[in-house]
Image (tube, rainbow, N blue to C red):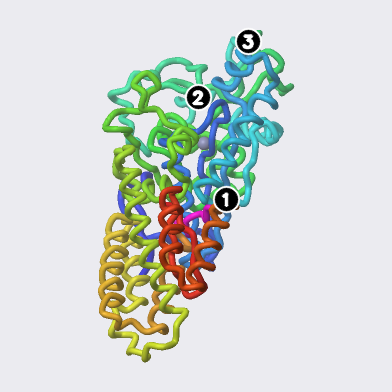
Amino acid sequence: MGLKLFNTLSHSVQDFTPLDPAGKKVGMYCCGPTVYDFAHIGNWRTFVFADLVRRYLEFKGYAVTHVMNITDVEDKIIKGVRESKTTLHDFTGKYEAAFLEDLKTLNCTLPQQMPHATENIPEIIALIEKLVARGIAYKAADGSVYFSIGKYRDNGSTYGRLLKLNFDELRVGERVASDEYDKESLADFALWKARVPEDGTVFWPSPWGEGRPGWHIECSAMSMKALGESFDLHLGGEDLKFPHHEDEIAQSEGATAKPFVKYWMHGAFLLVEGKKMSKSLGNFFTLRDLLAKGFTGREVRYLLLTAHYRETFNFTLEGLQGARTALARIDECLGKLREIAGRDALPRVQADRLDNPARLVDDFTSALDEDLNISAAWGVVFKWITGTNKRMAENSLSAHEAAAALAAWDKIDSFLGIGAPAEIEAPAEIVALLEARQTARKAKDFKKSDALRDELKAEGWAIEDTPKGPKLKRI
Ligand SMILES: [Zn+2]
């Protein structure tokens, strides 16, 4: 069955058909981080969502080129550079390194291209020049270059298609220099910002004088450079719809007179403990804050993947505990399956007797094909686990079936990216206790071996007897 996605541009669920006539290649751009701080859990919801989209498209057989920009020059960054009295490169480098590390912790596949705004200044200038040549951009008295919404509309183009802006009800202001503004401040926006003393050493030469690019034009220039003037998918958080994405469309289509992006996908907001995340409320979490509380990237990823991307998600610490329990249930089932798959003693049973493993993949992907309905897809997984556990409890699951079930799980995990729990290595003294227990058991000194097991338990370690011998597990 084909994949259907909700397209913010058409405001409807549509069949996904790539622009590539062969139907194989897909170009996908996701607005990346502005590296002025550590990314918070709301940002991570968007990046994990983008990772799911990319992995799922690959699972469906598409050859995806995934591009994510690094915004390394922008209003907030300039402020950070000024306040921290450091260089632009040193300031953004620290947060970019942290971002890449966090991306790995959450098991997100690295995009094939991660262009930096500061490394694409000539492309950004060339794009602005095109807009100036077409009469859609102009240099204002303050020395900055602005995009003219009026001229763009005079040319027959529609501004504000993602939000369905109604210009009859809007008061369009003259100009807005800041990168971020709301609908009430809709106005000509800055493409090139003339150098001001507060910019310090952050400026580049341009045909309009020294300055720096506006945030919106950076994404238009970098996405089209990487993926062409028209490409398939553009993703981002819903807070970016306006003005960022509306401006991206206007700049790109204004310059090329071609449709910019076929499908726009937006991830919904994330609340924390039922409220909008804010530092003053104490519910502002970076990934690092959650790791410091003892949670793992795997648990955070799982929790972020439990909700449909278009639903507002309430992220709670209790939910993270729940994620831990759910993962333990999955891991336990998979562990038992591995154990059975390693045996050959049981007779082979007809594969279709089981909650057929192929059905796990079919049912799961059918749910995801419907605009990535992951909540329904998880329902399929837990039903499958219940059925599989029942079969294993009855001792009626063959090694062959267990192996098939594991293969089915691996298939869906190729796009879920849940993986296996990280092995925690036991310290040497704990391993020594385990070895002493084994020696005692061999000598049939069960009193001693039981005492050693209790000692391990008191240290927080359990012994799990597996076909490959005893293993230590953290309690
Ligand atoms: Zn962007």
The residue sitting at the bottom extreme is 347
Q: Nearer the viewer, mark 1 or mark 2?
A: 1
The 10 Å Cα crowd at callout 2, few under 14, some 14 to 19, many 20 or more, is many
Q: Which residue is at the front of the view, 354 or 125?
A: 354
Write down the quadrant of residue 13 in the picture: bottom left
Q: Position of residue 130 (x, y in %)?
A: 63, 34
- Whether residue 25 sits left or right of residue 407 in the image: it is right
Q: Secondary structure at mark 3?
A: helix
Q: Which amino acid is tagged 3?
A: Glu
Q: Secondary structure at mark 2?
A: loop
Query: What distance separates the C-alpha of mark 1 from that of mark 3?
Result: 53 Å
Counting every numbered tag in the picture gives 3
Q: Position of residue 383 (x, y in %)?
A: 26, 66
Q: Which amino acid is tagged 1?
A: Pro
Q: Which mark is residue 427?
A: 1
Question: For mark 2, what is the residue?
Answer: 148
Q: Position of residue 288 (x, y in %)?
A: 50, 35
Q: Which residue is at the front of the view, 88 or 353?
A: 353
Image height of 412 relative to 260, above or below: below
Q: Are marks 1 and 2 in contact (CB under 8 Å)?
A: no
Image height of 6 relative to 134, above or below: below
Residue for point 31% across, 47% down: 322
Q: Is residue 46 visible?
A: yes
Q: Which mark is residue 198?
A: 3
Residue for point 50% across, 59% down: 19
Q: Nearer the viewer, mark 1 or mark 3?
A: 1
Q: Is residue 116 magenta?
A: no
Query: What distance separates the C-alpha of mark 2 from that of mark 3?
Result: 26 Å
- N-terminal label among 2 and 3: 2
The 10 Å Cα crowd at callout 1, few under 14, some 14 to 19, many 20 or more, is few
Q: Which residues are magenta?
A: 417-424
Q: Are marks 2 and 3 in contact (CB under 8 Å)?
A: no
